[in-house]
Image (cartoon, rainbow, N blue to C red):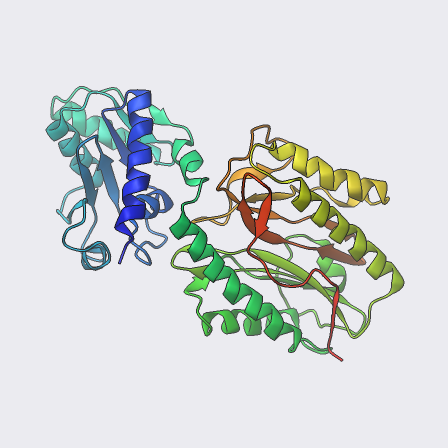
Amino acid sequence: MADSKACAGRVERFRALMAERGYDAVILRNNPDLRWLTGAERTFDDEVAHTAVVTPERLWLHTDSRYYNTFVERLGADCAWEIDQELVAPAAWAAARVAEARARVVAVEDTCDLAFFDAFNAACAAASVACLTPRLHGDLCDLRSVKDSEEVELMRRAQEVTDAAFEHICGFIRPGLTEQEIRVELENFMLSHGADGLSFGTIVATGPNGANPHAQPGPSVVQRGDLVVMDYGALYHDYHSDMTRTVAVCEASAEQRAVYDVVRRAHEACAAAVHAGVVGRDVHAVAVDVITEAGYGDYFKHGLGHGVGLEIHERPNFNRGWDRPVPAGSVVTIEPGIYLPGRFGIRLEDFGLVTEGGFEPFTRSTHELVVVGN
């Protein structure tokens, strides 16, 4: 059952934004936004099958027969949303709600496709409904970047599964296994120990493949002396976790340990620099400085981190281009890495909560270089 109090708070925040912008109504179709506002957990999938119209007084939601009963079960009979499964095109349905609300300024989120936007305007014209249709430009993304207590708890639960999976996989990895075999074991463990799904396609990269930050698991065989990079996460009630650990198989060379130490120092320096109000690119610069000073500046090119929530990549960001302060209540990753082409790669990633006083990681797995397979 949805947390009605939490959802009411989200709707209130959104309506305050609407009032500030002068919107009489807003049309929403993006599933993560709808999940955030309604609280209907484990209801949305990859299909764009739902349309909401939000006004200062009404909350309308249109869906179809594949989802209607689930919405009713998740939200309860006394929910604030008026849910229907009318057999009508979504754009025409939205135009009818706008006419009923007598809305004159109707914002449409910029994630809506042009076909829907054009169809909505055509339906309004056919019904002699005149309205302005400004676009939302990331407004809901900014609202969603500040998590409430329910969201934080769900991500803590997702990370508990993720941490347990790391402990399990460290006892599983050994020479002779393929990346794909490790991936299957890792994912099966999460799915059988509380995860509702996977945060994203798991990365398992051994040896030289680890130098490719988004390597796809394949037939490469783990060898003694390899470093194995594992980037993965569990999905729990639609909320994501995200963690990367790099382990050594049977033994680690002096060079591997030295590079790992640089990555760890960069990670921990960044974590110490995070607090509410810090500018995202400034935290990224901390990692760049540590890694560059150690002589590996040419081998760390991706962003340091990103927001996490109902999507695996959300606002805010820790990268060169993010010049905005990071708000308290945001949940972010810290994931510096060093990637030596043709040799090996190392990444160390935690995610956690930004507070007024600093960074509170959800991740509990060790930062030490773990040696497996002995």
Visible residue check, residue 289: yes
Q: Looking at the image, is 87 positioned above or below residue 190?
A: above
Answer with left or right where residue 94 lies relative to residue 351. left
Q: How many labels does the image show?
A: 0
Q: Which residue: 67% across, 40% down?
A: 273
- The quadrant in which the N terminus is found is bottom left
Q: Measuring 57% from the left and 38% from the top, which residue is drawn there? A: 317
| Residue 244 figure quarter | bottom right
112 relative position to 341: left or right? left
The spot of residue 333 in percent (x, y) is: 58, 48
Residue furthest out toward the front: 357
Tell me which residue sits at (63%, 37%) in the image: 319
Residue 141 at what x, y percent from top left? 43, 37
Residue 288: x and y in percent read: 75, 39
Residue 40, relative to residue 190: is it above or below?
above
Observer able to see residue 297: no
* Position in image of residue 361 (x %, y %): 58, 53
The residue nearer to you, when weighing 352 against 30, is 352
Displayed quadrant of residue 171: bottom right
Quadrant location of the C terminus in the rendered image: bottom right
Nearest the eye: 32 or 213: 32
At 33% from the left and 48% from the top, the residue drawn is: 35
